[in-house]
Image: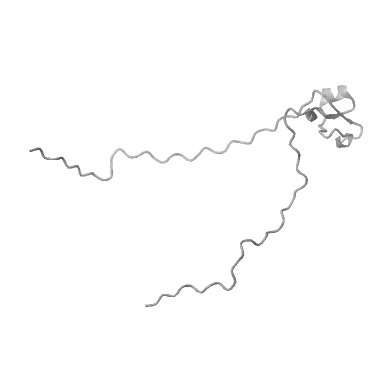
Amino acid sequence: PPTFTPKPTESPTDPLIPTSSPTSHGPTEEVIPEGDMRHSFWCGKDWADVNKKCHEPCTSGQDTECSDSTMKCIAFTNCRPTPKPTEKPTKKPNPQTPRPSLRPTEKLAISTPKLP
């Protein structure tokens, strides 16, 4: 008997149709290398105040980066950012598969050659 293939779709879909543009959740923070001198720029009333309290960093070097308008961005302080904590480790991997049993499930037929 003849076999029938499925009826073709009426309009094929195009996998190359562009998707909507990505959304942004605000500006991304620039990652400053660990030894960069900008890590020494901190807000404070004066150099002594900054080194005593380490209020907040101002890596741009601009006073406008300080949330308190009475403070200035002061360079070359002893303050440094606190390293971000590492994420929690992932869960342990699933246990390995069980070890092979000591008793085989099938017996192997072993033939020994007969000696003349």
Q: Tell me where residue 79 sits by quadrant.
A: top right
Q: Quadrant of the N terminus?
A: bottom left
Q: Tell me where residue 19 sits by quadrant.
A: bottom right
Measured from the top left, where is residue 115 in percent x and y? Answer: 10, 37
Q: Is residue 104 left or right of residue 36?
A: left
Measured from the top left, where is residue 97 in percent x and y? Answer: 41, 41
Q: Is residue 80 above or below residue 94?
A: above
Identity of the residue furthest to the left in this view = 116
Q: Is residue 116 left or right of residue 83?
A: left
Give the image's coloring scheme: one colour
Instruction: Tell which of 87 and 27 is nearer to you.
Output: 27
Identity of the residue furthest to the right in this view = 70
Instruction: Tell which of 74 and 99 is nearer to you.
Output: 74
The residue shown at (55%, 72%) is: 9
The residue shown at (28%, 45%) is: 105
Q: Tell me where residue 88 sits by quadrant.
A: top right
Q: Quadrant of the C terminus?
A: top left
Q: How many marks?
A: 0
The residue shown at (19%, 42%) is: 110
Q: Is residue 12 left or right of residue 57?
A: left
Measured from the top left, where is residue 18 in percent x and y? Answer: 67, 60
Measured from the top left, where is residue 95 in percent x and y? Answer: 46, 39
Q: Is residue 38 above or below residue 1?
A: above
